[in-house]
C-alpha cells in the first residue's frame, strides 16, 4: 500500500486532468476546493496541509508539462488552465491492453457488441481515469495514474500504429 499522501496526489491529479480534458481546448480556472474539498484557512491565513498538497499537485502537473496556466489565484486556483498538447495526446491514447482489459469495458456481454470506435474510446487513458474515480478505489486510481504518467511514449505510439488483432 502506498503512502496516503501519494494516493491523494494521484486522485488530485486525476480529478484535475478529467476537469481539464472535459473543458479542452477552453481555458478554465482550476480550483483546489473543487478537487480536494473545502478548506478554511487558519487564524494566520494558512491553508491545511491537504489543501497545499493539492495545490502542489497542480503546480507539479504544470512543471511536468501536462498543463499550462496564466497565473495562480493566491493558493486557491490556477487561472486559465488548459491541457498541453502532450497531455491531451496521452489522455486520448489507448491505455495498455492489459490495463484496459482489467479496468475498461468488459469483453463479454453487451460491450462485446459495441462498434470498434466505441471500444477504442473505452480503452483510452481518460476513460480509465474516469472509471477509476467513479469506483472510488484508491488502489485502482493509483495504478491507472501511474500507467498514464509513467508509461513510455513508445508504448502508446506502437499501439496506435499496430493493426488490431482479433
Image: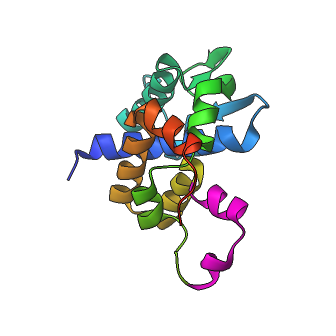
* 98 to the left or right of 72: left
**In the image, what residue occupies the spot 47% across and 24% down?**
45
Judge left or right: residue 38 versus residue 27: left
Whether 40 is drawn above or below 72: the answer is: below
9 part of magenta stretch: no
**In the image, what residue occupies the spot 53% across and 35% down?**
157
State whether residue 81 is above or below residue 146. Answer: above
- Nearest the viewer among 43 and 145 is 145
Residue 144 visible here: yes
Give how far across and how far down residue 48 sits, in percent: 40, 34
Circle count: 0
Q: Position of residue 138 (x, y in %)?
A: 36, 57
Segment colored magenta: 109-123
**Observer-nearest of 15 and 113:** 113
Q: Quadrant of residue 57?
A: top left
Q: Residue at x 46, y 31 (%)?
A: 153
Amino acid at each position: 500500500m502506498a503512502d496516503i499522501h501519494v494516493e491523494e496526489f494521484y486522485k488530485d491529479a486525476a480529478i484535475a486532468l478529467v476537469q481539464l480534458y472535459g473543458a479542452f481546448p477552453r481555458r478554465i480556472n482550476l480550483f483546489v476546493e473543487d478537487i480536494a474539498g473545502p478548506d478554511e484557512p487558519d487564524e494566520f491565513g494558512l491553508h491545511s496541509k491537504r489543501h497545499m498538497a493539492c495545490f502542489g499537485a497542480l503546480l507539479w502537473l504544470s512543471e511536468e508539462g501536462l498543463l499550462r496556466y496564466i497565473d495562480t489565484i493566491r493558493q486557491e486556483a490556477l487561472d486559465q488552465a488548459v491541457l498541453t498538447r502532450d497531455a491531451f495526446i496521452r489522455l486520448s491514447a489507448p491505455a495498455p491492453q492489459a490495463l484496459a482489459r482489467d479496468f475498461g469495458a468488459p469483453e463479454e456481454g453487451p460491450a462485446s457488441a459495441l462498434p470498434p470506435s466505441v471500444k477504442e474510446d473505452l480503452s483510452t487513458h481518460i476513460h480509465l481515469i474516469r472509471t477509476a474515480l467513479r469506483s472510488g478505489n484508491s488502489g485502482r486510481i493509483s495504478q491507472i495514474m501511474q500507467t498514464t504518467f509513467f508509461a513510455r511514449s513508445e508504448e502508446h505510439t506502437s499501439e496506435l500504429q499496430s493493426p488490431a488483432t482479433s
